[in-house]
């Protein structure tokens, strides 16, 4: 049996991160993803944060695996004609341009539906309908406007953005789910539909527990927050430092080597059920008999002191030793793993979560593979396409163009003539990871 999404053809008008992360997932599930890029220019990320001159950046390569690239000027007359043909031949169109860009090209939802009523048209925008709907948005803007930044960081410091791309890659995930759901619906209805995901909504969805806390605040201070009992609460969910978002107290504590290693830390959750084991292992068995410490309620106002005592013990062990000792005691904990450690972790290589890929002009590099594992449809990570690598192939095999028609489209500038032939690439490339 083939891949889960084999036979689904995606017209990929995405760029930067949010859209490409969605279409990359669909490609990993087996969809044929045709990435449309401007002739001679391409997705801006091809040239952003380049580590090797004149070579597609890691930014681009790590977000565009398993896709084909066609260069097409969708603003020229001939380009619009070809674009219309592509809409006819595809099941899904995905875009994350600034608001209105597709309408300005002349492709409104009404027109698209007329061209292909079965097409699913999926978009990412920064905001949904409302005062900011026309704004351009990047990751950190979404984190700031979606509730993440106001609730991240320490109480006495400024709002913080996180390293996880929750606005971009998070919204890309939402969009992929919307597309697959719409495809499922199309099986029954025979019709496509619009799928719209706003980055602000995506971030807010991931901050659900913080909206929960906003409402709890009306009924008194939030006991699990470090501000309790000595600090003050305002009228909005405050920043909680490293406190756990759930009902179990947790914190980041230092481990052996913290003076020189910025990641010699671990997260420990002092869950009630496992507390006796934790107290004993850190040398505080006395707490178990002490009414000042032996109930979760008694400990709640003293979490700072509690984690200080835990830290005195963790500082005598490295973060992996802490994990080895606490896990058998059912104490949830997690070492702070650096990107270097994750890149080198053999188990992640084995599961395909971290993959080495070969690229004809860049050579070998590491990427994050598909985080969603399907037993009957495992993802095989293939390198990203060079700009316009598949232009002729797509015109010929998807749209049925003759050689003369391809030449005519190239000579008027509707499609690019990058002339990267598959044969030339085969000579340069080795394996595809
Ligand atoms: C990401 C973002 C800020 C980038 O903005 P930008 O670099 O100015 O790019 P735009 O999306 O405005 O598109 C640039 C132009 O290129 C045009 N273009 C894109 N592909 C084209 C093609 N193949 N042929 C011809 N023109 C093309 C667009 O139509 C648009 O033209 P217009 O401004 O005349 O309408 C913006 O696209 C955006 O807000 N997107 C939605 C939210 C989002 O996904 N953000 C996360 C990005 S990770």
Image (spheres, rainbow, N blue to C red):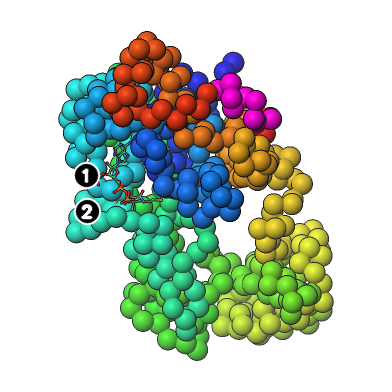
Q: Secondary structure at mark 1?
A: loop
Q: Is residue 187 left or right of residue 327?
A: left
**Magenta region, main secondary structure:** helix
**Of residues 33 and 25, the one drawn nearer to the viewer in this rendering:** 33
Image x and y of residue 416, in percent: 38, 30
Pinpoint residue 180: horizontal percent, then vertical percent: 42, 31
63 versus 87 height, above or below: below
Residue at point 66% right, 41% down? Answer: 363
Q: Is residue 427 magenta?
A: yes
- Left or right of 418? Residue 97 is left
Ligand 1 closer than 8 Å to the CB at disc 2? Answer: no
- Quarter-of-image position of residue 327: bottom right
Whether residue 173 is visible here, answered yes or no, is: no
The magenta stretch is 422-430
Task: First in sequence, mark 2 or 1: give its number.
Answer: 1
Q: Which residue is mark 1?
A: 100
x%, y% of residue 379? 60, 31
Local secondary structure at mark 2: loop
- Circle 2 crowding by C-alpha within 10 Å: few under 14, some 14–19, many from 20: some
Between 56 and 342, the residue placed more toward the observer is 56
Residue placed at 55% from the left, 22% from the top? 422
* Residue identified by numbered label 2: 134
Q: Is residue 135 left or right of residue 68?
A: left
Mark 1 lies within 8 Å of ligand 1 (Cβ measured): yes
Q: Quadrant of the N terminus?
A: top right
Q: Is residue 69 magenta?
A: no
Percent from the top left, x then y, of residue 311? 72, 78
Q: Residue furthest bottom?
A: 230
Residue at 53%, 79% (x, y): give it. 226
Mark 2 near mark 1, Cβ–Cβ under 8 Å?
yes
């Amino acid at each position: 049996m083939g891949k889960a999404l084999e036979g689904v053809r995606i017209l990929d008008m995405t760029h930067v991160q949010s859209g490409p992360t969605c279409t990359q997932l669909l490609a990993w599930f087996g969809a044929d993803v045709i990435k449309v890029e401007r002739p001679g220019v391409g997705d801006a990320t091809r040239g952003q944060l380049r580590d090797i001159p004149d070579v597609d950046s890691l930014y681009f390569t790590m977000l565009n695996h398993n896709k084909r690239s066609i260069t097409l000027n969708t603003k020229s007359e001939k380009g619009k004609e070809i674009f219309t043909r592509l809409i006819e031949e595809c099941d899904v169109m995905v875009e994350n341009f600034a608001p209105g860009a597709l309408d300005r090209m002349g492709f409104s939802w009404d027109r698209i539906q007329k061209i292909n009523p079965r097409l699913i048209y999926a978009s990412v925008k920064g905001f949904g309908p409302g005062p900011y709907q026309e704004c351009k948005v990047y990751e950190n803007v979404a984190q700031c406007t979606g509730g993440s930044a106001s609730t991240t960081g320490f109480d006495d410091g400024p709002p913080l953005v996180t390293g996880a791309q929750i606005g971009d890659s998070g919204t890309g995930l939402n969009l992929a789910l919307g597309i697959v759901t719409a495809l499922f619906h199309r099986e029954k209805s025979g019709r496509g539909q619009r799928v719209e995901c706003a980055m602000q909504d995506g971030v807010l969805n991931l901050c659900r527990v913080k909206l929960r806390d906003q409402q709890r605040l009306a009924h008194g201070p939030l006991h699990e927050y470090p501000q309790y009992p000595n600090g003050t609460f305002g009228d909005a969910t405050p920043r909680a430092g490293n406190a756990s978002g759930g009902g179990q107290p947790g914190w980041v504590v230092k481990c052996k080597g913290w003076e020189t290693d910025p990641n010699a830390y671990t997260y420990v959750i002092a869950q009630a059920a496992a507390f006796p084991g934790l107290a004993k292992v850190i040398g505080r068995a006395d707490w178990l008999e002490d009414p000042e410490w032996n109930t979760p309620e008694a400990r709640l106002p003293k979490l700072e002191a509690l984690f200080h005592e835990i830290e005195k013990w963790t500082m005598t062990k490295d973060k992996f030793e802490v994990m080895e000792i606490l896990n058998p005691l059912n104490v949830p904990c997690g070492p702070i793993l650096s990107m270097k450690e994750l890149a080198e972790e053999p188990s992640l290589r084995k599961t395909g979560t971290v993959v080495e890929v070969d690229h004809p002009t860049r050579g070998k590099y590491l990427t994050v593979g598909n985080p969603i594992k399907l037993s009957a449809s495992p993802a095989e990570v293939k390198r990203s396409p060079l700009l316009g690598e598949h232009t002729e192939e797509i015109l010929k095999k998807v749209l049925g163009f003759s050689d003369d028609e391809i030449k005519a489209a190239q000579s008027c500038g509707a499609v690019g003539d990058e002339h990267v032939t598959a044969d030339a690439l085969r000579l340069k490339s080795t394996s595809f990871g």
